[in-house]
Image (tube, rainbow, N blue to C red):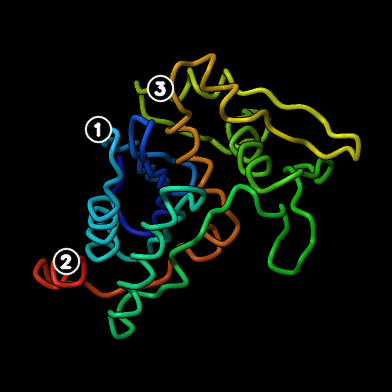
Amino acid sequence: QLTSHNDCILGVDVAGMGRDCSVRCYRYGDYVERFDKHNSGGKADHMKVAGQVVNEIRTHSGYSVSVDTIGEGAGVYARLVEICEESDGRLDEKTIISCKYSEAAKNSSGDDLTDITGQYKFANMRAYLFWAVRDWLNPDNGTNAMLPPGGSFIEEATEIKWSFLSNGKIIIEPKEDIKERLGHSTDEFDALANTFHPKAVKMVGSSSEEYYDEEIEDMLY
């Protein structure tokens, strides 16, 4: 059990039309406390998701937030950055990370990201992040990874397939193929994978000041 709820990497996977749930994954180092899920009813609810995230970063210090910005998450990311910019420096927009699966799997210096052994490289950021979860869960790597009980994560994780491209880089199968077999999207797995984005890992621990509830409402609405 956590003694502090600060210094969290919050992975956010946003639901939209045709998807079941928005998911927030709370990872503190090697401990995932929970996956918070809510059903969007097939409609985009960007302001609700943004409000939930702002409530977390204003009541706890040191959060970094990694939002999937392919599709529906782009609107949530943009609103969170806007809120930070309106906060007069009390919230740092650099702690809100655009996690774009299609981008190159490279670090801030432009070098290829690799697996934990330094052996494998990746076709895109999605492949790197998914493999980072695999490395983290591998008991041989001594991470002491801890996940909450229940939920759909294990079902999702064991269904994902990967392969090598001709250049030797690893690629993950399309989401549509996984969803066809599972019957639903890999929302919990995606939310956890987002927490391994290099920028989110780098920014966790940054300090922030608290807001009052009425200030949040003013900024959101």
- Label 2 and label 3: CA atoms lie apart by 33 Å
Q: Name the residue under label 2.
A: 221
Q: Position of residue 117 (x, y in %)?
A: 78, 42
Of callouts 2 and 1, the N-terminal one: 1
At which x and y percent is residue 24?
A: 35, 43
Mark 1 → mark 3, Cα distance in angstroms: 19 Å
**Which mark is in front, 1 or 3?**
1
Please identify, in this view, whether the residue under mark 2 or under mark 3 is nearer the observer.
Answer: 2
Which of marks 3 and 2 precedes in the sequence?
3
Amino acid type assigned to the residue bearing label 3 in the image: Ser
Say above or below: 206 vs 160. below
**Residue type at tag 2:** Tyr
State the SS at label 3.
Answer: loop
Tag 3 residue: 152
Give amino acid for label 1. Gly
The residue beneath circle 1 is 41
- Horizontal arrangement in the rendering, residue 91 relative to residue 191 (left or right): left
x 46%, y 27%: residue: 185
The x, y position of residue 165, in whole percent, is 84, 34
